[in-house]
Each structure stands twice: as C-alpha cells, then as structure tokens.
Image (spheres, rainbow, N blue to C red):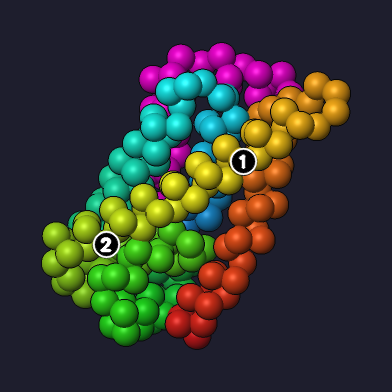
C-alpha cells in the first residue's frame, strides 16, 4: 500500500489531476458512484503535497463533478422514465427515486448545493433533476456551488491532516496520515450534516 501511494505521489501533476477528474466523474454516476472512493481520491491528491496541488485539485474535482452530474442530468432529461422502469432503476430502488424527487420538489435547485454531502443521493439527484425538467442553468449554478463547497472542505481537511503529519514523531508517510486523519475528520464533520439532509429523503 505504501509503495503504491509513493508511486501516486510521483505522477506528473497533469496526469494526477486527470485521474482525479475521472474519479469524480465516475463518482457522480448512479450505482457506480457508490463504489468510487471520491473522498479518498481528493485526500490522496492533497497528500502529494506539491505547491500547485491545492488549486489543481480544486479545479479537477469541480470539473469532474460537474461533468458527471451534467451527463446524469441530460440522461434524466431524456430517459428518466424508461430508466426508472428498467433493471437499473430496480437496482436503484423506487424508494430512492421518489425520495430524490421529494428532495428536489421540497428544496428546488438549491438542494444540489448539498448533494455532494449526501451518500447515494449525490449521484441520483442530478438524474432526478433532469427527469423533473429543471432548468439546466439553475441546476448547473447550484451544482457548481455544491461541488466547490465539497472540494473546499476536503482540501481544508487534507491540508490540516498533512500539517499534522509533520508534527508526529518518527517519519510517517504524509500521504497515509493525510488520508487516514482526513477521513476521520471528514466523518466527524459530515455525519451531522448527512443525517440532517438524509432526513429530507425520509
């Protein structure tokens, strides 16, 4: 694991950010997004610790999220009902479809600002927004704010975790410490918000 992380740190910055952007794109796809460790990917990019990593990471996360969500939105705009009745729709579950529509009907486009903080729904809400014929301009504006807030939070947590690695005794791997501590801090920070917003889906 440590050797693999060291190899990640040696990747050219453009390659690293390209991979991160693709991870964020796949993270925004329903079903597939559940299997993609987007949080870990951001913390790993921050853990590399290069001077240009912070801004590049923010840009890669923002572009990747918006690309993935836009694709889901457009698919929902055109194929929401057939997809909902398909096997894929069955895997997602009718209860989740209905909950996503209820969240958007209750909170409108601004609910996309909290979508990144909602597991499962972060990938389903764009699909539902397209099916509900939401304005793409309204959707994109709210989604951009949400992606920026999510990326900024993880950048801050990752930066704090990497700084903590420098204070620990011995010579711990900064990448491992950044991801480990960052995930713990993220859990503490996000669990309350996720419970609150998940209640809207109930």
- Towards the viewer: 81 or 169: 169
- In front: mark 1 or mark 2? 1
- Towards the viewer: 51 or 40: 51
Rendering quarter of residue 98: bottom left
Question: Which residue is found at the position 21% from the left and 75% from the top?
Answer: 132
Q: Is residue 158 rendered to the left or right of residue 96?
A: right
Question: Which residue is found at the position 46% from the left and 14% from the top?
Answer: 12
- Residue 142: which numbered mark, if any? 2
Rendering quarter of residue 74: bottom left
- Towards the viewer: 113 or 69: 113
Rendering quarter of residue 200: bottom left
Q: Secondary structure at mark 2?
A: helix
Q: Secondary structure at mark 1?
A: helix
Q: Look at the image and tell me whether residue 143 can be seen.
A: yes
Q: Main secondary structure of the magenta part?
A: helix
Mark with earlier residue (1, 2):
2
Instruction: Kindly identify which residue carries mark 1.
Output: 160
């Amino acid at each position: 694991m440590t050797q693999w992380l060291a190899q990640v740190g040696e990747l050219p910055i453009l390659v690293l950010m390209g991979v991160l952007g693709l991870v964020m794109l796949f993270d925004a796809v329903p079903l597939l997004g559940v299997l993609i460790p987007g949080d870990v990917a951001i913390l790993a990019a921050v853990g590399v610790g290069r001077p240009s990593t912070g801004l590049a990471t923010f840009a890669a996360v923002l572009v990747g999220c918006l690309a993935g969500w836009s694709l889901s939105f457009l698919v929902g705009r055109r194929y929401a009902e057939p997809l909902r009745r398909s096997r894929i729709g069955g895997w997602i579950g009718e209860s989740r479809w209905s909950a996503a529509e209820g969240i958007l009907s209750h909170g409108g486009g601004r609910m996309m600002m909290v979508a990144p903080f909602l597991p499962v729904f972060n990938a389903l809400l764009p699909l539902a927004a397209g099916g509900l014929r939401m304005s793409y301009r309204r959707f994109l504006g709210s989604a951009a704010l949400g992606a920026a807030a999510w990326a900024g939070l993880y950048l801050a947590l990752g930066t704090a975790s990497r700084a903590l690695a420098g204070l620990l005794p011995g010579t711990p791997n900064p990448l491992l410490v950044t991801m480990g501590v960052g995930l713990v801090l993220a859990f503490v920070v996000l669990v309350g918000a996720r419970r609150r917003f998940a209640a809207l889906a109930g």
